[in-house]
Every structure is written in C-alpha cells, then in structure tokens.
Image (cartoon, rainbow, N blue to C red):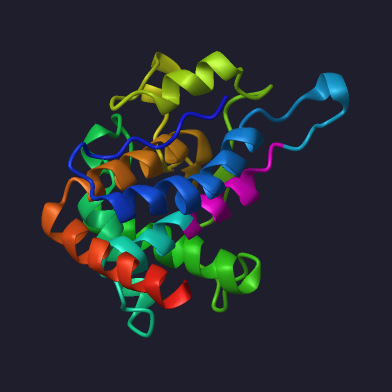
Amino acid sequence: MFLPTRVDPGTPHAVRVFVDQVVDLYLMDVHAMLRLPRPEVSITEGCNFAIAAVLLNVISGVSVVLFKPGTEGGDRGQLFRETTSRFYPWDKEPAGAIRDPAEGAKLLYQSFRNPLAHAFGLQDPEPAEPLKIARFKTPGFAEDELKAIEESTERPNDALWNVPTLARDADRTLSLQVEPFYWGVRELVRALTADADRMAVAERYLTSMLRLRS
C-alpha cells in the first residue's frame, strides 16, 4: 500500500491538499512500477525510463507550484536546478556518489530531465559521457520494502544506502539509479514543505488558483 508523502507539520492546508491530490498521484504510479519486474507473471520490464521521467516531472512541477509559485513563464531549467540543489538530500548520498548539490542538480536537468522530456533522451550534440538509467532490484520491491522507503527520513536499508542516486561508473558512464531517486524525491518534497516562507507564498497561490477554478 502506498504511503502518502510526508510533509512538514507546519505545512499549510492548500499545500497539503496539493501534495496529497496531485504530487502523490504521480508517486503512486512510481510505487507500482517499483514492484516490477515480476517474471513470475511474465512482466520482465523494470520501467526504468518511465520511473525516471515521472520523478523528474515531480521535481519540475513542485519547482513551479511550490518553490516559486506563479512562474510558469520563467526559466524552467533554472527553477528545476534551484529546487533540486537546495532540497534534494545530497548530503545523504553514499560514498562514490555525486554529492555536490550544484553539480547534481545540473546533471539531473541537462543529462536526464531535458532530453527525456523533449527528445526521448536523444541529444544533439551527443553528451560528453555515456548515460544510463538503472535498476538494482530484480525482481522488484515487495510492499514491506517499499513501506520502509516511504516512511523513512533516512535511507531505510543497507541496499538502498549503498547505491548512489547519481554516480560515474568505472567506464565513466553517468548512471541515474531510480530506487534511491524515488526516496530522494520524496525527501525533496518534505524538505521543501519545511520552508515556511515559500509555503506561505504557495498557499496564497494555490488558494487563488482554486478560487479561479471554482
């Protein structure tokens, strides 16, 4: 069973509703895809690219709605990078991971988010290093394992703790690992809701949007 994203206790009402009714709809799909692959029922796909695309979309969405509300016409890439550098739990990445917030945010956007959103991951000119979106859990997670991920503010088990979100492999391939990325994006949302000043602005923005649509 999917556990709703944790938010800060002081999160205002409209922001809580937004996380519950919008953000968590995306994350529920990721929860389901992380149960894969299931070879015993002939589902051999791990949905690596689909999981990464959804999680990158979540960051993009909260950067516009919660980080700097009302900036739909602004520089989306800058918003994505600022949100990710400030609120993604880079400090909890294991040894060997990319841990610098500015570098990590730049790579997530330039190497993964922008190409996946606009050109199926194709880039012209080609990136300077090979890219990979990977899974380590085969078969997929059991529900109790997903529960441990979703209820924890720390990396919840040894396997997840030791796998970087972003890292360069021995052959210099830049690898994005979707399992720790799922935990990290949930933590990003939680950390963002703890920014009281931004949440006050987001609350006014969301309340105004709801009134306009009622």
Is residue 53 highlighted in magenta? yes
Residue 10 image offset from top left, x and y in percent = 17, 42
Residue 29 image offset from top left, x and y in percent = 61, 42
Tell me the quarter of the image containing the N terminus: top right
Is residue 141 highlighted in magenta? no
Q: Is residue 116 left or right of residue 107?
A: right
In this rendering, the answer to whether 211 lies above or below 150 is below
Main SS, magenta region, reads helix
Residue drawn at x 40%, y 37% as measured from the top left: 5
Residue 129 image offset from top left, x and y in percent = 48, 59
Instruction: Count numbered badges in the picture.
Output: 0
Q: Is residue 129 left or right of residue 65?
A: right
In the picture as drawn, the residue positioned furthest to the bottom comes out as 73
Residue drawn at x 54%, y 56% as measured from the top left: 130
One can see residue 176 in this view: yes
172 or 64, nearer to the observer: 64
One can see residue 131 in this view: no
Residue segment shown in magenta: 46-57
Residue 110 image offset from top left, x and y in percent = 42, 67
In this rendering, the answer to whether 18 lies above or below 71 is above
In the picture as drawn, the residue positioned furthest to the front comes out as 214
In the picture as drawn, the residue positioned furthest to the left comes out as 197
In this rendering, the answer to whether 91 lies above or below 21 is above
Residue drawn at x 69%, y 30% as measured from the top left: 36
